[in-house]
Amino acid sequence: MSHFTRRLRYVGKRLLQAIPIVLAIIILNFFLLQLAEGDAVDVLAGEAGSATPEYMAELRAKFGLDKPLPVQLAIYLKNVMVLDLGYSFRHDMPVSQLIVDRLMPTVLLMVSTITLAVGFGIVLGLVAAMGLNTWRDTAISIFALITYATPLFWVGLMLIVVFSLNLGWFPTSGMENFAMFYEGWDRVWDIARHLVLPTITLSLFYLALYTRLMRASMLEQSGQDYVTTARAKGVTENRIMFVHVLRNALLPVVTMAGVQVGALIGGSVIVESVFAWPGLGMLAFEALFARDLNLLLGIFLLSALLVVAVNLVVDIVYSTLDPRIEVG
Amino acid sequence: MTFWKLFARNRGAVVGLIILLLITFMAATASLFFPEDPFSLAGQPMSPPGENGYLLGSDSLGRDVAAGIAHGAKTSLLIGLLATLVAVFVGIVMGALAGYYGGVIDNLLMRTTEMFQTIPSFIFAILLVAIMKPSIESIVIAIAVVSWPAVARLVRGEFLSLRNREFVQACHTLGMADIRIMLGEILPNCLSPVIVIGSLMVATAILIESGLAFLGLGDPNSMSWGFQIGAGRTLLRSAWWVCTFPGIAILLTVLAINLVGEGINDALNPRLRERT
């Protein structure tokens, strides 16, 4: 069997493994919907102001809400398969439409956050590991300890106080300045300026995480036999660090970047609502305020599926990066 | 060496313990120093710190920020401890059953924890509180629901590695009941990692609680730090102190608990300490 078909098989196997998790998440979502007080018809009736019991019963029959639970679950599963996540009566729009509209800003925020956190985390971890037990190592450890303990929303608010209100360097909220009608590169620059504070806020926690991970990973690798061999061959210490150890130490950091995506989405709810960043997190915050449970559940479902997808991609990339991983 | 001597070798942990004791003292004496309801509109709104008799200023409705912080300490510590206790209890039960018996239970537990690792836990907690309506109980349940799988995985691993050891086999030969072996023989041997993970979970629980309260999902009847910051965020331009001080309280508390957790870890696993 060629290497390529083996890899293809591995991808197929991982896809199959993801299916039960996706199903379980959808079913969990369904039961959460059941747990909530009232159903879509109650909401509709509430919105309309008044509705007769007959009319409500008729509506329930129309939506299939009078059927036994397993049948309703089947209907729900079928709906989710075709990406029908229900209707948001607050926004007067299908939930899936709302989510798609708000997806891009969140993806932008997450990509810039992961880049910043992983990039700086690797550098800081490297610096700490190379100057083990010096003042640099201690300073980086203290920094990591403090960012670990700081609530994200508070960091965001403090950054606004310092950099937006006092220094006026960055805008306080939003994604772009619509009033200016920027186009082309001006618009990109405008969005980039709006992106700075939310990205820094969201990446702080993960920066601490990746720094610790990178430091531990570097230390672990420098105790390996191949380092002794390289040293015995007379390779310079710098070359050992940067060429031999660094490459191997990067692997666990890459995996961790995938695992953390779920937590990152949770953090983006907070950061987006602090900076009024118009993404999924902000949408969740609005849904929370409007008690729009259908929308909230849709966001939850989609973000869970996003995590499954990212983990899948990371696994596949990882197995390509590290040939030691058994694909067969 | 005794536990205390080992713990005290870690200076950070001692500092953490002192901070934590001070915060606990503040929580315990909140009603003594600030007998009035922290929600009460005591007086002059928007007073800067140190003026009009407010140590840390007041917010837009004239609520005393310092009183809020003192009373908020109660809420944070209470929710952090309760949620962790529930999560650790559920985690131990599930992990012990799965690790000891293996088979179907084990499979089921592993799949469940895998699912929990996939779903974004903070959004899940938001959903649970929103569905159950915000209250101390619902917040505790929500935090416990998203936290127990980590404990369960840990306990399962420990049980798995201990269940075939000689001392357990000896218990079987003596005819001991399974439940007695689990509780009396295996569990005490895996308590130290559970205590460490539990102490760190209190810190995470406090962070989750403050995030929920910030988003407006706190218990409406008890003052909390997250609520104070959420209420003060519209005043950032004119009254920075309303948001700043409760945030420092969260930071100090979580930091102190993390430091203490690390100290406990060093004291319970002295070999790990000596390696680095």
Image (cartoon, rainbow, N blue to C red):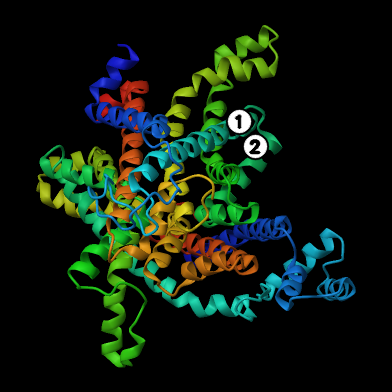
Image quadrant of residue A184?
Answer: bottom left
Q: Which residue is drawn at 41% across and 67% down?
A: A272
Residue A33, image x, y percentages? 70, 60
**Quadrant (top left/top right/bottom left/bottom right) for the N terminus of chain A:** bottom right
Furthest residue to the right?
A54
Which is nearer the eye, B69 or A64? B69
Labels 1 and 2 within one chain = yes
Q: What residue type is labelled 2?
A: Asp
Residue B218, image x, y percentages? 51, 51
Q: In this view, does A8 lie above or below B86?
A: below
Whole-angstrom CA distance, mark 1 to mark 2, is: 7 Å
Q: Are marks 1 and 2 in contact (CB under 8 Å)?
A: yes
On what subunit does the disc labeled 1 rest?
B
Return the residue at label 1: B99
Which is nearer the eye, B71 or A84? B71
* Residue A246 in the figure: left or right of residue A305: left
Q: Which of marks 1 and 2 is nearer the N terminus?
A: 1
Q: Residue at x 36, y 35 (%)?
A: B257
Residue A141, image x, y percentages? 22, 43
Q: What residue type is labelled 1?
A: Gly
On what subunit does the disc labeled 2 rest?
B
* Residue A282 in the figure: left or right of residue A46: left
Numbered badge on residue B106: 2
Q: Which residue is drawn at 33% across and 52% down?
A: B58
Within-10-Å neighbours for mark 2: few <14, some 14–19, many 20+: some
